[in-house]
Image (cartoon, rainbow, N blue to C red):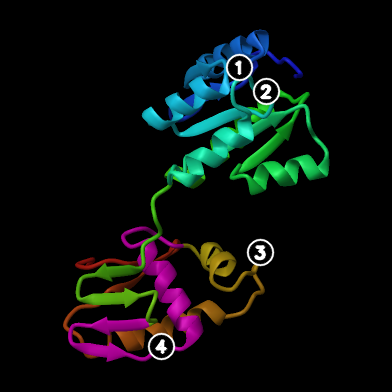
Amino acid sequence: MLQQSPQSLSKSDSNMRLLIIEDDRESADYLVKAFREVGHVADLAGDGEEGLALAESGDYDVLVVDRMLPKRDGLSVIGSLRDKGNRTPVLILSALGQVDDRIKGLRAGGDDYLPKPYAFAELLARVEVLSRRHGGPAEETSYRVGDLELDRLSHRVTRGSEELTLQPREFRLLEYLMKHAGQVVTRTMLLENVWDYHFDPQTNVIDVHISRLRSKIDKGFDRPLLHTIRGAGYMIRDGLR
């Protein structure tokens, strides 16, 4: 392990609860101390049996598991957890770093694999990524603003009792605007997220599509939902005057 002072790393925005399953006491103590110093909660198990029992009884964000453990090896611990429906993310630490070793670890149910020696900064970054993937909110499948509703799964858009017919690009544009309802959406945001352009092609493509979309979702209804915010961009919001 490339030991690096945890104080040199920035504090994390949110606390994680981690379980370290590692039989090498020096390495284990260092990891627990390092994770705690950057703001996380870390418990320690010194063998596979203890680690399995703690993992089954505790509510952890991520497990950090060594492969070669006394009483029960790391892959067996992971396999047992997966067989019982436990989907807590697992990062495997091991001196066994060959490609075949990593493949075995991932196929046994590990979510990531970091060979020893390693830098704590990289370990921390990988653990934080696993925690975000596991604990992030599920993406919405539908959006609603006033009486306008968009269903991402059926690609159906309605306003009140009327179903609206949108072209694929118009649908993507409306979806992005509704996802950010009440927020100003800039031209750059639309170019990058709806058209996949990372530069301004100096065309009126956005203006044309906004005009078409506005005519479909607002024309004939009692109040507009799609607004141009002069000098800033666009916004979908119910009741903006």
- Kindly tell me whether residue 24 is visible in this rendering: yes
Decide which of tag 3 and tag 2 comes sooner along the chain: 2
Amino acid on which the number 4 mark rests in the picture:
Leu
- Image position of 217 (left or right of 192): left
Residues at discs 3 and 1 in contact (Cβ within 8 Å): no
Range of residues picked out in magenta? 156-185
Residues 111 and 206: in front is 111
Locate residue 188: give its quadrant.
bottom right
Residue 120 bears which disc, if any? 2
Residues at discs 2 and 1 in contact (Cβ within 8 Å): yes
User: Which image quarter is the C terminus in?
Assistant: bottom left
- Image position of 113 (left or right of 206): right
Residues at discs 3 and 2 in contact (Cβ within 8 Å): no
- Image position of 14 (left or right of 106): left
Image vertical order of residue 188 relative to residue 3, above or below: below
Mark 4 crowdedness (10 Å alpha carbons): few <14, some 14-19, many ≥20: some
Locate residue 222: give its quadrant.
bottom left
Task: Give the residue at x 68% y 38%.
Answer: 113
Amino acid on which the number 2 mark rests in the picture:
Phe
Circle nearer the viewer, 2 or 4: 2
Amino acid on which the number 1 mark rests in the picture:
Leu
Q: Secondary structure at mark 3?
A: loop
Task: Give the residue at x 34% y 76%.
Answer: 151
Tell me where residue 175 appears, x and y as whole percent. 41, 72
